[in-house]
Image (cartoon, rainbow, N blue to C red):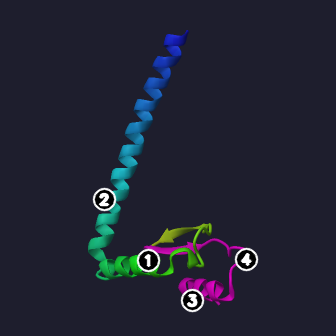
Amino acid sequence: MNQLVNEAVKDYVGRRSREVERDLEATLSSLRAYRQRDPQFDGAIAAFVDAEARLGKEDPAEGKVVIGKLVDGQLVAERMIEGASPLQTEIRRLLNASS
């Protein structure tokens, strides 16, 4: 019985590992394609790194859970996060082009 369970787990892990690898490869491929389409990509990454370095632990969004989805490379929030500052709320409004 123990051998059957071990073989079943080994089979499952093998299949799941291949699925995860395919998903990661597809994500990487999509990211590379997006990077080639977006001329501001390198500048955006540099600005992000600079902001992370400057703000550190003072980052107002650090550790916040964002619920939404990416649409054309932009985060579209499904709902506002409770406790957001007025500045965060205004930035989200502007980014989402909502009123």
In terms of depth relative to the viewer, which is nearer, 44 or 56?
A: 56
Please tell me whether mark 2 or mark 4 is closer to you in this view: 4
Query: Quarter of the image containing the N terminus?
Result: top right
Q: Is residue 3 above or below residue 51?
A: above
Label 1 vs label 2: CA separation? 28 Å
- What's the mark number on residue 94? 3
Counting labels gives: 4
Residue topped by disc 4: 83
**In this view, the mark in front (4 or 1):** 1
User: Which label sits on residue 32?
Assistant: none
The nearer-to-camera label among 4 and 3 is 4
**Residue 29: mark:** 2
Secondary element under disc 4, as helix, strand or loop, is loop
Q: CA distance from mark 2 to mark 4?
A: 36 Å
Residue 86 position within the rendered picture, expressed as x and y whole percent measured from the top left: 68, 88
Residue at screen point 35% across, 54% down: 26
- Type of residue at label 2? Ser
- In this picture, which residue range is highlighted in magenta? 72-99
**Picture residue at 60% right of the left edge, 67% below the top:** 63
| Amino acid at dot 3 | Leu
Q: What's the residue at 41%, 37% (across, down)? A: 17
The residue identified by callout 1 is 53
Q: Earlier in the sequence, mark 2 or mark 4?
A: 2
Determine the secondary structure under disc 2.
helix
Circle nearer the viewer, 3 or 1: 1
- x and y percent of residue 61 in the render? 58, 75
Instruction: Estimate how packed mark 3 is, as few (under 14), some (14 to 19) or many (20 or more) residues with alpha carbons within 10 Å.
Output: few
Quadrant that contains the C terminus: bottom right
